[in-house]
Image: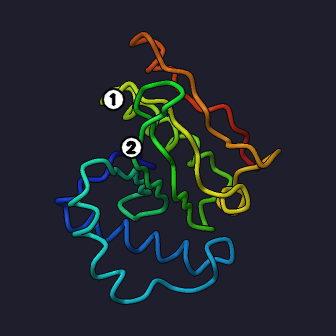
Amino acid sequence: MIDVFIADYRNPLQLDAVVSLLDSYARDPAGGGTPLAEDIKQNLPAALAGRPQMFSVLAFDDGEPIGLVNCIEGFSTFACKPLVNVHDVVVLESHRGQHIVQRMFACVEVEAQTHSGSVVEQRASPARICATGLCCVSARPVLRHRALSTEEDVKKAVPTIRTED
C-alpha cells in the first residue's frame, strides 16, 4: 500500500528518507549523475528543519520510501499572494509509471491551499520531471494552479498532468 504524506522534519526516519531519496535523485542522470556529498547529507536535515517555509511530501510503499517532492513557499508579486515552488521531484525507478507523482502533487496542492492559500509553481526542470515518470509536453511549468476556493475544490485537487503507463 502506498502512503503519501507531508514529512515531519522532527522525525529522524522521515528525514533519512528525504536525504536518501534526494541522493537517489542526484545519482540519477536527470539529477546530475553524482551522489550528494557527505557533508550535504549530514547537514540537510537540520537545514530543512530550520526553514519553516519548506515542506516535503513523501511516498512510502509498505514502509519503504519511494517518492519525494521538496517545496519552498515564496511570494508571487503578480498575484500578491504566497506560492509554493516545487524544487525536487523524485520517484524511485522501481515505482515509476504508477501515478505516484500525481498523488504527491495533489498532496502539495492541498498543503499549499490549507496553510497559505498558495498557488503551486513547478521549478524543477522538465527533463528532470520526465525522469520521474512524467510525460512533459513543453518547457513551460507543469504545475500552475488557480487558487482553490472551496473545501470541495481542495478534495478534488489533482494537478493536470499525464503519467507514462
Q: Position of residue 40 (x, y in %)?
A: 36, 81
Q: Residue at x 58, y 46 (%)?
A: 122
Marks 1,2: beta carbons within 8 A: yes
**Residue 33 vs residue 140: left or right?**
left
Q: Which residue is drawn at 52% across and 75% down?
A: 24
Badge 1 local density, few (<14 within 10 Å), some, or many (20+)?
Answer: few
Which residue is farthest left?
10
Residue 73: which disc? Answer: 2
From the viewer's side, name the closer residue of 75 and 66: 75
Badge 1 element: helix
Badge 2 local density, few (<14 within 10 Å), some, or many (20+)?
Answer: many
Q: Position of residue 86 (x, y in %)?
A: 51, 49
Q: Position of residue 93 (x, y in %)?
A: 63, 68
Q: Mark 1 points at which residue?
A: 116
Residue 30: which disc? Answer: none
**151 up-or-down from 69: above or below:** above
Which residue is farthest bottom?
38
Quadrant housing residue 50: bottom left
Tell me the amino acid under the disc marked 2: Glu
